[in-house]
């Protein structure tokens, strides 16, 4: 049992903020932190970790709080509320900016667009924090072209589990740099990151193309992902009549307005239903903020606060073509028809460069996200959803698939060792070096 004296916050560091909510977006796994700490500087975060480490006090960072299965919990430890570390600053180089870990992506977008730039990859939901997204890798609608959100980071300042505050990059402390990005907060907590930017278009033309069969859908989605004109390509499976599912490609090409895209040429040869195709022009900002309206609706209806046992898998695309229709036809997945969304993204393995991200073999990959909602106060429904997630994960593994670690899947240390495979030994060495007390982000349950 931890001595009562450890309940006294370390002197001279961050303020305690008992008002910070501790449930995460998943609303499945609860925790009771010893204290909630709100650092305003990297030095304050360093002091907290340096105090906690020798005493074995768990430390986890919370930015937007969008973990699904309590991955950011700090049971009996310090929950670090990162919201005060939220600065976004331009640099001397117009193609980069520096964002603190608690900043939201919508703040990054606002600062970058003001200068005519944007990050090459952004999460769909811009309310997520910079630090949380980079710690898990981060996927977006342009990942088929630019890789992970984390792949656009050129430098990152962190606090390791030893209390060391250090800046690392590909050239400076590259071992730590590679372990931090998509490293699940296991070796260090991100303080701030330098993000590379690309020129932002003034306008985009958005195509939503509808399919009744999965085969043509996957083939056309891959074709558009290889098309030079389309910067963003993603898709969904949507409920149709009589228990069937339709598929929708969402593809975007930039333009200036003076010379609009040739719709017929860009969609020539595609096998979608041309009678219901949707084509619209949007400002780039309108496109990037496209999820805000959906969030407002979900908050009003109360669905935002319900349990979210989401599952995200990476599959070889050849396997996804049959895997996705099979799980949608599964009676255990019927809840997706009424309280869920199925997202499908084409990916290229060579574009996903963060070493800690586990990905399937092969070049053409597909990200499959089952974003279901469970009824409130229905523990049985949550347990059934978690059991279904585990079953689907095992089925995906048999097909060469991997788990995106943000998912609501109960994992043991042995599961994690199998998940990381050949990378596990190096990961364990880095953990020993940079977090020898094993205090950081213990909600993932990676270590025995």
Image: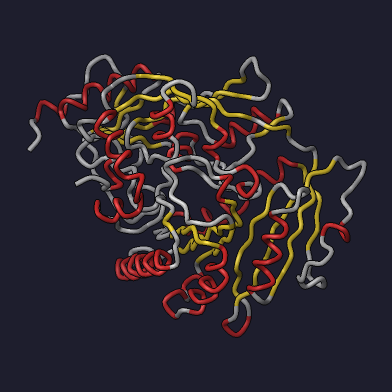
Place of residue 295 in the rendered image (x, y in percent of width and height, measured from the top left)? 56, 51
Can residue 111 be seen?
Answer: yes
Can residue 375 be seen?
Answer: no
Q: Tell me the residue at 37%/30% (across/down).
A: 189
Q: Tell me the residue at 50%/34% (across/down).
A: 130
Viewer-proximal residue among 376 and 117? 117
Q: Is residue 120 above or below residue 11?
A: below
Place of residue 53 in the rendered image (x, y in percent of width and height, measured from the top left)? 21, 27
Place of residue 414 in the rendered image (x, y in percent of width and height, measured from the top left)? 25, 54
Q: Which residue extends farthest right? A: 258
Q: Quadrant of the N terminus?
A: top left
Q: Tell me the residue at 72%/25% (across/down).
A: 115
* Color encoding of the figure: secondary structure
Viewer-proximal residue among 324 and 256? 324
Q: Tell me the residue at 46%/58% (across/down).
A: 312
Viewer-proximal residue among 266 and 127? 266
Place of residue 207 in the rendered image (x, y in percent of width and height, measured from the top left)? 76, 58
Side of 210 relative to 125 (left or right)? right
Q: How many marks?
A: 0
């Amino acid at each position: 049992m931890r001595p009562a004296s450890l309940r006294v916050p370390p002197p001279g560091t961050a303020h305690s903020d008992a008002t910070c909510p501790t449930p995460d977006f998943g609303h499945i796994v609860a925790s009771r932190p010893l204290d909630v700490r709100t650092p305003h500087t990297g030095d304050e975060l360093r002091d907290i970790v340096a105090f906690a480490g020798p005493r074995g006090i768990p430390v986890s960072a919370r930015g937007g709080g969008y973990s699904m299965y309590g991955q950011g919990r700090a049971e009996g430890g310090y929950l670090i509320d990162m919201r005060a570390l939220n600065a976004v600053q331009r640099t001397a180089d117009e193609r980069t900016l520096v964002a603190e870990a608690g900043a939201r992506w919508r703040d990054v977008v606002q600062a970058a667009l003001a200068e005519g730039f944007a990050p090459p990859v952004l999460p769909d939901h811009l309310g997520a924090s910079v630090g949380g997204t980079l710690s898990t890798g981060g996927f977006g609608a342009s990942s088929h072209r630019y890789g992970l959100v984390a792949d656009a980071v050129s430098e990152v300042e962190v606090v390791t589990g030893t209390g060391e505050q250090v800046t690392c990059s590909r050239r400076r402390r590259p071992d730590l740099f590679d372990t931090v990005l998509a490293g699940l907060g296991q070796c260090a907590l991100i303080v701030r990151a330098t993000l590379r930017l690309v020129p932002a278009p003034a306008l985009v033309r958005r195509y939503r193309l509808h399919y009744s069969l999965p085969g043509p859908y996957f083939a056309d989605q891959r074709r558009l992902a290889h098309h030079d004109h389309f910067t963003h390509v993603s898709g969904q499976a949507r409920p149709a009549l009589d228990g069937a599912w339709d598929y929708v490609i969402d593809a975007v090409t930039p333009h200036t307005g003076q010379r609009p895209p040739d719709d017929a040429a860009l969609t020539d040869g595609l096998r979608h239903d041309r009678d219901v195709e949707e084509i619209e022009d949007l400002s780039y900002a309108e496109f990037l903020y496209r999820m805000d309206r959906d969030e407002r609706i979900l908050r009003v209806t109360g669905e935002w606060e319900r349990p979210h046992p989401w599952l995200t898998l990476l599959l070889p695309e050849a396997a996804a073509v049959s895997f996705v229709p099979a799980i949608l036809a599964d009676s255990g997945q019927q809840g997706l028809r009424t309280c869920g969304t199925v997202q499908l993204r084409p990916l290229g393995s060579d574009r996903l460069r963060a070493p800690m991200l586990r990905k399937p073999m092969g070049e053409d990959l597909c990200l499959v996200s089952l974003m279901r909602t469970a009824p409130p106060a229905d523990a049985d429904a949550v347990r059934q959803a978690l059991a279904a997630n585990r079953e689907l994960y095992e089925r995906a593994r048999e097909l060469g698939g991997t788990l995106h670690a943000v998912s609501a899947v109960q994992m043991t240390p042995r599961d994690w060792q199998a998940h990381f495979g050949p990378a596990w030994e190096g990961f364990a060495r880095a953990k020993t070096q940079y977090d020898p007390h094993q205090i950081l982000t213990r909600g993932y349950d990676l270590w025995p």
